[in-house]
Image: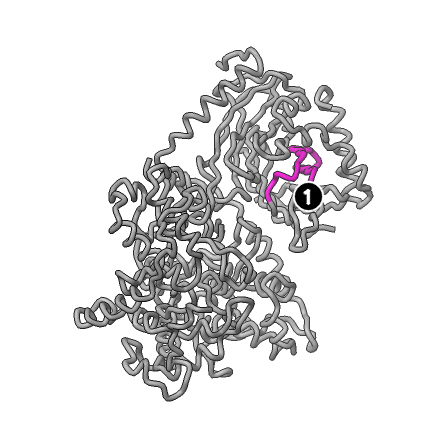
Amino acid sequence: MKHRALLVAVALLLPGGAAMAQSGPWGPGADDAAFAQMLKTSFKGRGVATLDRLNQDETQVFCSDPETVYAPESAARREEIEKVNLASVKWPADGVWLGDWKEGEKIAQSGRGNTWTDKPEQVNGGNCYNCHQISAEEISHGTIGPSLHNYGKLRGTDDAVMKATWAKIYNSKSNNACSNMPRAGHMGILSEEQMKHLMALLLDPRSPVNQ
Amino acid sequence: MGKPMKIRAASKDGVTEIKVLMNHEMETGQRKDASGATIPAWFINQVTAKLGDRTVLQAQWGPSISKNPFLAFRIKGGKAGDTVTVTWVDNTGDTRTDEATVT
Amino acid sequence: MHQASTGIAAFLAAVAAVTVAHAQMDNPQAGIEAYREALQDGNPAELHEMAGEELWTTPAGPKNASLEQCDLGLGPGVVKGAYARLPRYFADTDRVQDLESRLLTCMETLQGKDPKVYIDASFTAPPKEEMNALVAYLSGQSRDVAVTVTPEHPKERAMYELGKRLFFFQGGPYDFSCATCHGQEGTRIRMQDLPYIPGHEGAAAGWTSWPAYRVSNGQMWSMQWRLNDCFRQQRFPEPIYASDATIALSTYIAANSNGAVMKTPGIKR
Amino acid sequence: MIEHPMERRQVLTLLGALAAAGMVFPRMALANWDKAAFEARTMDEALKALGAGTPATGGDVQIIASDIAENGAVVPVQAVSKLPNTERIAILVEKNPSMLAGSFDIAADTIPDVTARIKMGQTSNVHVLVKADGKFYTASKEIKVTLGGCGG
């Protein structure tokens, strides 16, 4: 559970806390105390989905208030959040960026893992096709994220591209504070090896993504 | 005995349209349950539809028909007040017959 | 008329030609639309409506009473159009209730049943099958009726605001909130269009088509089940059946869809 | 049985009556089920079991279905014949373990236009086979089965 190191037990669930001092745009009846009370009485832990998942870290707290997230006066806070997340990125231990694109395709296809119906030993998928177009052959792809088709072909494969791509997969909030994308490495969703396979899917010239 | 069907029969311009929803699992016999045991095949394999006393359609089905089967077809003739009777039989010998009045 | 065939080879050649023609589909979305259209006629949810009506009218529970005197907001026994006005505040319980939490109240007061049995049962267990059938029947009694959910009572206002706040609340290992998928317009997951819930049109697309029969597993899903599975995929802990969080979200979605016409029960992938 | 549709029909009517009376035993229920056709593993076998060695293609048989099925568990298929004296309509899914999904015996006054819903394990050609005046005709269409939802 090393990804929990950064988690801040937010005041939300603890009476008298201060982390949510500014209550955001929420109207009457939805103040911090009422909201915390609702969460407390409405959820139960099940399987791997334990109740501590409702304890937000500072990124989640900031990104849960849509009125302030993109407000001009939040620019500095956004940068801070990105800096904290970038600092969490661990680079490949052996300096090798790319794994096997075929394995990467399987990981990109799979949306499994981490729900209360998944077993702890379940190998997690990357959920990639849920939101992105990747390989052109797969027509069943989502559109929440940008198309990644021709990712490597368009960007090349120099070290800067490798590094930026790795950082994005490892911790998506490192360059966009409230990106909709999960933080695959930071939250322990994918292993280093799995992320290398995804890198290969995007950047290996032989990958169908770049054909 | 199986659960009730929903039968709709409507006559218009000398043609009666019959739509049937059947309540059945239609297990293929190829699926496994959580413990890994094969779930036995269980599916409707014969359907007979009648308008009054006259048989208008007979079907033989395999396990590739979807769960809670839907069947729609049309016949020449039939008028409001006529009775449509549908009977299914499944591979375990269970059966169900329901009726509807043509509107 | 039909060309004569010279055997299996000709047959297979014809099949191959068909295959090529359809491999060139340039508009998958149009194909999906045609598929959804074809499902509309003959919705197996009707089978659950039949079962639900029987449950509604059949005496049961320690008091051997039916649910026919249940007050869903329009007076005891009035089912026509009642679902389209839920969730709403009920003075007798001093709570805002959605259809399912209200049904639990009626089962307890009229029939003497223990709601806990229904709350704790899994969605595929017999007690929940009853709930799902009742919901199919009662939502069918609001088909073609306009949604009228306009939070006015202070507790309705509060539920709406709590629901809105929960909609944007991120948590869990994936940082997901409801808004991650339903907070932008015109996006989809895989081939599934995602309604934009903060807007009227998106909220209406969602609210007026659930409860629904799901063809993927042949199950009748109530709104509570729908929300429960959203939270599962959000990687959240499990929302308790008929809890305030679920009612708050329903209030938020229903009120955003106010005025739209109910198409319940629906049929879904 | 295919050669003697009337006899078959009489047998089935009797069976229906027995079934309605709750008197059908499992083995009897299966007795009129065309086991060979339903258990065929190749198109050749299936066509042979149905008595249709060499079906003709042409516009008088139609298969109406969407190009894509959002879910393979339920794929609506409408099978239409414009041929006079259509006796039977069958729906076959090439890549299903049991290719023959169903067959429908059409009475004289029944319009040969049947809608059913079939399961498809994967993208496949789907065939409608029609027997009319003792001869066999076919129409085919590829239906693509997509992976839906987040789970997969």
- In the image, D141 versus A42, the foreground residue is A42
Q: Is residue C241 left or right of residue D37?
A: left
Q: Is residue B44 left or right of residue D123?
A: right
Q: Main secondary structure of the magenta part?
A: strand
Residue A158 at what x, y percent from top left?
A: 25, 46
Could you say where residue A185 lies in the image, as x and y percent from the top left? 39, 60
Report the front residue among B32 and C41: B32
Residue projecting furthest to the front: A94
Which residue is painted at 61% across and 21% down in the image?
D131
Q: Amino acid at mark 1?
A: Gly
Q: Which residue appears at 48% of the width and 30% of the height?
A: D142
For the C terminus of chain A, give its image quadrant. Answer: top left
Vertical side of A151 occupied by B59: above or below: above
Kind of element beneath mark 1: loop
Asked if one can make out residue D145 in the rendered structure from this viewpoint, the answer is yes
Counting from the top left corner in percent of width and height, residue B84 is at 65, 41
Q: Is residue C99 left or right of residue D43?
A: left
**Image position of A16 with respect to D146: above or below:** below
Residue designated by label 1: B29
Numbered range of the magenta stretch: B44-66
- Say if the magenta span includes residue D10: no
Disc 1 residue crowd, few under 14, some 14–19, many 20+, Cα 10 Å = few
The chain containing the residue under callout 1 comes to B
